[in-house]
Amino acid sequence: MNVLAWLTAGVAGWPWVRALQPKPSAPRWIRLGRDAALALAFGTGATACVFFVLIWAGLAPRAAAWAADGFVLAAGAGLWALRRNREIAVEVREPAAQFGNAWLPGIAAAVSVAAFLAALVLMISAGPQGDWDAWAIWNVRAKFLAHEGLWRNAVSPDLTATHPDYPLLWPAAVARAWSESGQIVPAAPQAGAFLAALTLVLLYACGLAARCGWQWSAAGTAALLMTVSLWRTAPGQYADVPLAMFLLGSVIAAAAAQQAGWSPAGLALSGTLASFAAFTKNEGLAFCVFLAGALAFAARQRALWWLAGAAPVLALTALFHRLLAPPKAMLSAASFQQPSRLAEVLKGMALEVWRLGDFPAHPLLFVLLLFFAFRPKWPWRPLWPAVAALLLLAADVAVLWGSSSDASWQVSTAGDRLLLHAAPVLLLCAFWWLARAQGAAVLAEPTPKPRRRKAGAESAAKS
Amino acid sequence: MTEVKQASQAWWQAVAVAALSVVAAYNAVIQFGYADAFASQIRDPYNVQEMESKVSRIADRIPVTERVGYFSEVPFSAPAGQAAFFAAQYALAPRIVVREDAGSAARARYWLAVFAREQDFAQAGARRGLALEQDLGGYVVLYRRLESVR
């Protein structure tokens, strides 16, 4: 049950994704892969949030866990039933540039994914308790949440070094699995770490394939798996990989909504996924703000649908910070007055960018090489996800600069994970832009017959 | 001229994609090798499992609502000191573990101590008004406040 609980969360998320996600004009396997990845992300986030709300309301953890699953599944099924006969926005697929020897990145991606998953299993088995932050912060707080009547220990000011001010989505997700199984064993966080990493890679691969075809998906996935910090962090049971999963999911859902003429339902799905990131880590909250701003610029009034989707969990996050989290001064004015700290942070982050790959296998190096070869013309579209991700990195730098801790220590311990939050979104954008390069041969894949088409769907797509 | 330019660009594209593919596949094998070596050589680097197995023997004696005091001769500023403290907190959760310099430590009836070497553990506890309850081995000792022993 420690493993099954994560899959039941995915099952509970499935009807939500099917109800809200626009229908892609991509082959069926891509649609299924993307929907499955989005359902795992959505279900994990939604069940964890409802579980936490219910134990806050006074339910015992076991009852809260099952009630959360039931509520998310029933509400999703209800929404799907309501929207079943309505018109479904269809994503318009743009032609993608083509390159020769497409089987080569296909093999590279297959080898990379197989090696990554095998390494993940090996590392997770070797370190059942995960890496430092897993047992010092995330899983220890999950233990508090899983014990009846003791969940407030997770936000106790006595936990001075265990960050009781951090949001609780990931500990709640682990505690929910423990509560359903009735055993506090490492299998639950281990399975969660494995599935979060798998979902991240699947989301990325299918997000690229849905827009640009399998060749670009393969090349992009091979580049993503050059990111060394993903190999190191994924088995560590940290909340950083789930955070990256939510950020990527929100961008992919919003980009699909854009392809379908800024579909309101798709935007709401994106907003909900982004709000899960806000309740996972404070960096997720910052990304939420930046993505909301970028979408307000790109989608205008339609961005209100995004806000509507994000509102419930953003409200929960605000209540958590206002009512539960012990106050903690993250920033100090004295630190901001030291330009040497900024220089130290920038130097440290530059070093982390260099360490993002294991030279010559560096994702940035190969993106630059591909840009030189394909020369995608400006303006690169869509630009808004990259703007949000770059603003997140800028905010990370600002927080490291203004932090009261030693700057070089902070960058050396957290810099690689901060880059990991934004790297999948930035790489995804880079490959989306590359696939639209002019001058290369154009790949025209046959558009599959839509599963269900109602009057008005075409006009929605055209808009 | 345009055809030559296009052929040159297509050649560069093929080279770039081929280089990406070969390097990515090679890197994946290398990274798997690192993971395999790490997994076979390093087990429980911070002694978290070891702490859990020691504490599991006495956990039932400490009510889950208790604050458990903690002291160590390994300073908290050192990574080893932090690792020992967080491992103790992880092993004793859902009880909150508080260091002896924390205000709420004064109320703690049970105390866990981590030492760096063999010594007179009873005397180290007595200096803090604690009675040795059980030596858990590996320099980890459970104490009880003297008033609560009486």
Image: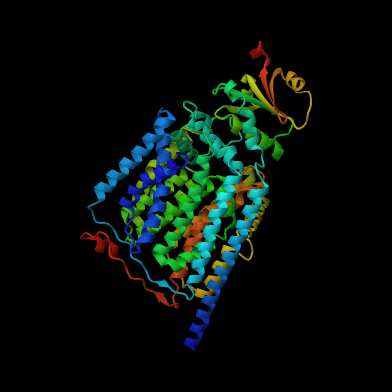
Query: Quick one: A392 or B112, which is closer to the camera?
Result: B112
**Do we see residue A25 in this rendering?**
yes
Most extreme residue toward the bottom is B1
Residue B42 point in image, percent of width and height: 67, 46
Residue B33 point in image, percent of width and height: 63, 57
The colour scheme of the drawn protein is: rainbow
Query: Quick one: A111 or A129, which is closer to the camera?
Result: A111
- Residue at left 53%, top 48%? A240
Most extreme residue toward the front is B40
- State whether residue A451 is above or below residue B39: below
Quadrant including the N terminus of chain A: top left
**Do we see residue A281 in this rendering?**
no
Quarter of the image for residue B28 reads bottom right
Most extreme residue toward the right is B119
Most extreme residue toward the top is B150
Quarter of the image for residue A95 reads bottom left
A53 horizontally vs B101: left or right: left
Quadrant including the C terminus of chain A: bottom left
- Residue at left 47%, top 69%? A434
Query: Quick one: A248 or B89, which is closer to the camera?
Result: B89
Residue A2 point in image, percent of width and height: 47, 39
- State whether residue A32 is above or below residue A448: above
How many numbered discs sit on the rendered protein?
A: 0
Quarter of the image for residue A58 reads top left
- Residue at left 39%, top 63%? A210
- State whether residue A219 is above or below residue A125: below
- Residue at left 62%, top 33%? B52
Residue A14 point in image, percent of width and height: 35, 48
